[in-house]
Image: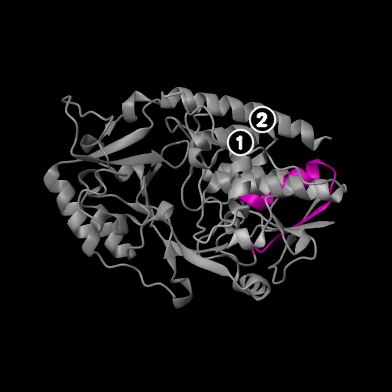
Amino acid sequence: MIEVIGAGLAGSEAAHFLAEHGATVALVEMKPKKFTPAHRDSHFCELVCSNSLKSDDVYGNACGLLKEEMRSLGSVTMAAAEAARVPAGGALAVEREKFAAYVTEKLRSHPNITVVEREQTELPARGIVATGPLTSDALSGAIAQKYGNALCFYDASAPIVSAESVDFSKTFTEDRYGRGTGDYVNCPFTREEYEAFVSALVTAERANLHEFEKGEIFEGCMPVEVMASRGKDTLRFGTFKPVGLTLRDGTRPYAVLQLRKENAAGTSLGLVGCQTNLKFGEQRRVFSLIPALAHAEFERYGVMHRNTYLRSPQILNADFSAKDEPMLFFAGQMTGVEGYVESAASGLLAGIHMWRKLGGKEPVIPPATTVMGALSRYIATPNKDFQPMNANYGVLAGGFEDVRDKKERRRLLAERALHDVERFKSQLLG
């Protein structure tokens, strides 16, 4: 029996692939007996930072391409995402509870999976560790004792407000550049309103962090107040950019905060790009300065929490196995892939590679022309400045440099990747 430690995105993918291919799996999950500071639901695959799985554009976005690669390999989280999809323009957003319930039912009902509800405190002799960015202290200690170089940095999530508390007379519904079906609610600022908001944001009181949580801040999860402190126009040229949006009078707003549906009914709205570590009272005060949110009711405040990951190039091979323990695998965000989709993909790959080893076969790494293959190589390539990495075109193997049109070049890269992931599938069966 193979132990898979952790029933988040990565662990669920690994357990599902192994079970579907005949392996017996003990899926070890400490919920509901014990929760991390960020989790509150007993279901597997709980999404805590956002309900968005980012762009679903296969031919124009690296994360969209990654999702299509995963679908090709039978990803359970991609199946769950389709079943729980909510409108979000060109993005793949899901109803969190429905998404988690889908995966939980699939795994709990699988005849080859036994769910073990306990906290794992030691590394397994053979298995897949996918305990995520909030790995418990005991298991973190075991990893640190063995490898001595686990790191911590911060991760932040955005507030969610009740839709009925939003003043829609001060908003307009439009997706950037007209893409999508009007899935984003836009809260425009005048120059004076924007500058007042930024001033309050950068001077607001932040929540205290425990000493053990103090470490690096990853750029991809930068709190909005930290971004704003870099300059008064930083948000206006970033998360709050008004480009591609038009007010009812035909003019462009000075800046825009976007709200996105958190559930299919649209009764809960998330503040896009507003991950924060402000104290809860300060969040209410500062975000209420946004005209449309003057009387907003907060269903969840933003939080910042510890995020643990490994110096993977020193520890892991490109098949996610440990260099010193061939039957010990790691998966998920703790390996240095950043993002929900990327974490799930790493779990799927760890499950694939473990399955091949169980059958006495050599590992087959996806081609570097695929996003899955590029990320696999990233986490195993020596890098003294190693940091978590999202899916992006920069990690893909080169090609089509003579094609000057960026959209066309990305389309060609995607077509090549989808062809090569099919070739990878055929190799797995060999």
User: Coloring scheme of the render?
Assistant: one colour
Q: Residue furthest right?
A: 360
Image x and y of residue 66, in percent:
57, 37
* Crowd around label 1: few <14 · some 14–19 · many ≥20 (10 Å): many
What element does badge 2 sit on?
Answer: helix
Asked if the residue under mark 2 is in contact with the one under mark 1, i.e. CB atoms within 8 Å, the reply is: yes
Q: Residue at x 52, y 34 (%)?
A: 64
Amino acid carrying mark 2 in the image: Asp
**Is 325 placed left or right of 176 in the picture?**
right
Foreground: 172 or 256? 256
Residue bearing mark 2: 420
**For the residue marked with disc 1, what is the amino acid?**
Thr
User: Label 1 vs label 2: CA separation?
Assistant: 7 Å
Image-based side of 370 in relation to 225, left or right: right
Residue 10 belongs to magenta span: yes
At horizontal 44% and vertical 42% (from top left) the residue drawn is: 262
The location of residue 380, given as percent across then percent down, is 63, 54
Q: Can I make out residue 121 in this image?
A: yes
Please tell me which residue is depicted at 42% across the width and 51% down the height of the picture.
220
Mark number displayed over residue 9: none
Horizontal and vertical percent position of residue 10: 64, 50
Around disc 2, counting alpha carbons within 10 Å, would you say few (fewer than 14), some (14 to 19), or many (20 or more)? some
**Any magenta on residue 405?**
no
> Can you tell which quarter of the image residue 238 is in?
top left
Magenta region: which residues?
A: 9-32
- The answer to whether one can see residue 112 in this image is no
Indicate the secondary structure of the residue bearing disc 1: loop
Question: To which residue does mark 1 refer?
Answer: 370
